[in-house]
Image (spheres, rainbow, N blue to C red):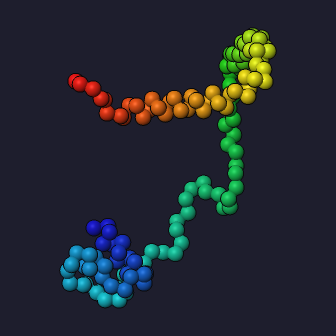
Amino acid sequence: MSWINDLDALSSAGVLGFDAPAYVMGTQPRYYGHPALETLPDTLPKMNNQPQKDEFKPSNSSVNNPKWKKWLFGLLATAGLIFGASKLKFTKNLISKINLTNIKALPQKAWNGIKAGWSRLVGLFKPKTGTP
């Protein structure tokens, strides 16, 4: 019945000028115009611990990581840097193998790869020919 109360409150506030629940349910209207229902108060009750203005107040509980977590993170970060540096040595050989002709042929190779992938995709939906 809450939707009926909501529509009656709209009628009481002057938003609707008729008995909307009766219209929806197809019954005789209970009133015409705006009924004298009790309206909601203009002021809402105050909630506890609400700021008076829009502002940011940081909480006193800051993140306090223990030392073992800091050491573990430092160890993992250092290991990652060492691993990345070792991989960088292998990429120096790869960079020396790249020349201008390989770079010029790259767009054509990419386009051929796209066409081959499209042909494979279209081939999945083509009907099979031949005798079963």
Q: Indicate left or right for 130 with 67 as reference.
A: left
Kindly identify the residue that appears in the image at 28 percent across and 87 percent down. 31
Instruction: Give the position of the C terminus as an image quadrant.
Output: top left
* Up/down of 124 relative to 10, above or below: above
From the top left corner, tell me how far across and down residue 33 is, in percent. 35, 89
4 relative position to 63: left or right: left
Is 34 above or below relative to 54? below
Residue at position x 34%, y 77% in the image = 8
Residue 75 seen in the figure: no
Q: Say whether residue 60 is left or right of residue 117.
A: right
Q: How many marks?
A: 0
Provide residue 19's location: percent of width, then percent of height: 30, 82
Looking at the image, which residue is at 57% across and 28% down?
113
Residue under the point 42% across and 78% down:
39
1 relative position to 74: left or right: left
Quadrant including the N terminus? bottom left
Q: Quadrant of residue 81?
A: top right
Kindly give the residue lying farthest to the left in the view shown: 27
Q: Residue furthest front?
A: 130
The answer to whether residue 106 is visible is: yes
**Residue 126 on image: x %, y %:** 35, 34
Name the residue furthest bottom. 33
Q: In front here: 38 or 2?
A: 2
Frontmost residue, 67 versus 52: 67
Whether residue 53 is situated above or below residue 89 in the rendered picture: below
Q: Is residue 9 above or below residue 45?
A: below
